[in-house]
Structure formats: C-alpha cells, structure tokens
Image: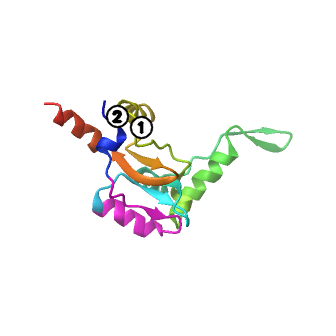
Amino acid sequence: MLTAKDVMTTAVVTITEDTEISVAAKLLFDQGYNGVPVLDASGALTGILCQADLVAQQKKLSLPSVFSLLDGFIPLGSMKDLDREVEKMSALTAAHAMTRHPTFVTPATGIDEVASLMTDKGFHTVPVVEAGKVVGIIGMRDILGTLLERK
C-alpha cells in the first residue's frame, strides 16, 4: 500500500504568516501551486494559503439575514463568520487570508486516506507533517500520478 511518503513532494515551498498577499499570490500564480503551507516564526504549520483564499478577496460580501424585534436587529447568521469573511477580504498578509488549523497527514498515512480527504473535503493540497514540522506536501497531481504508475 502506498503512503504519503511515497508520493509527497519533499521540496516544499512555504511562506510565513507575515508574507504579503501580493507576494503570495504571485508565488501561487507563477508556480501554478494550488496552495502553500504557512509557518510561524518557529517553523510550525499554522495554516495553508490556497488560491480559493485569495479569490475570496474579490467576492461580494454576503451579509447575514436579520430580523427586527423591538427596534433591534438580531442576526440569523454567525457574526463570527462575517468577521472572518471581512478579515479574508481585507487581508494584507498570509496570516489574515490563510485557512487556519489546516488538515494534514503524516508520512505513514495511506494514499487512500489522502485521496478521501481531497475528494470528501474538497482539498487540492495537503501538507505532510512529522514531529511538528512540514516534511512534504501532496497535491492532486501527485495522487493522479499513482494511477499512471499502475499501468
């Protein structure tokens, strides 16, 4: 059975939380990456910045529905979600636009589990972490490559 270690890219390009959005966007666009891991000052994984996170800056803000009661307005949606959406749309650094607490796998994780994560959760890029450090990354292209090798 193939594992993450068998297909992961070990030359991982990462960015830091204070990387400017314009620099991160250029990196993703120029290199054709779907996403890159975001590390804190100690090198620990704190997030992942994906193309979707950057595209979110261009979308229209969706305000939560409200209803009026005794001259007051009560939101029907989560104000926390609205705050996060505004933060992403106005982000200047990776820390503000990234997806926090990203799902990751270990080198021993089976490819079937990685593929399930990608299809079930809609992930295009999954970091591989060992002992708290990013040691690899798996993209959909890496998974697709395993199908070609079977023939």
Q: Is the residue marked by circle 1 packed among few (<14), some (14-19), or many (20+) residues within 10 Å?
A: few
Please say whether residue 22 is one of the residues in the magenta stretch. Answer: yes
Please say whether residue 72 is one of the residues in the magenta stretch. Answer: no
Q: Determine which residue is flagged by label 1.
A: 122
Label 1: element kind: loop
Q: Determine which residue is flagged by label 2.
A: 111
Colour scheme in the image? Answer: rainbow
How far across and down, in percent of the image, does residue 56 sit? 47, 53
Q: Which quarter of the figure has residue 112?
A: top left
Whether the residues at callouts 2 and 1 have beta carbons within 8 Å, the answer is no
The quadrant of the rendering that contains the C terminus is top left
Please say whether residue 140 is visible from this viewpoint. Answer: no
Which residue is located at x 86 percent, y 40 percent? 70
Which residue is located at x 77 percent, y 44 percent? 73
Q: Is residue 47 left or right of residue 30?
A: right
How far across and down, in percent of the image, does residue 18 sit? 53, 69
- Magenta region: 10-30
Alpha-carbon distance for marks 2 and 1? 16 Å
Sequence-earlier tag: 2 or 1: 2
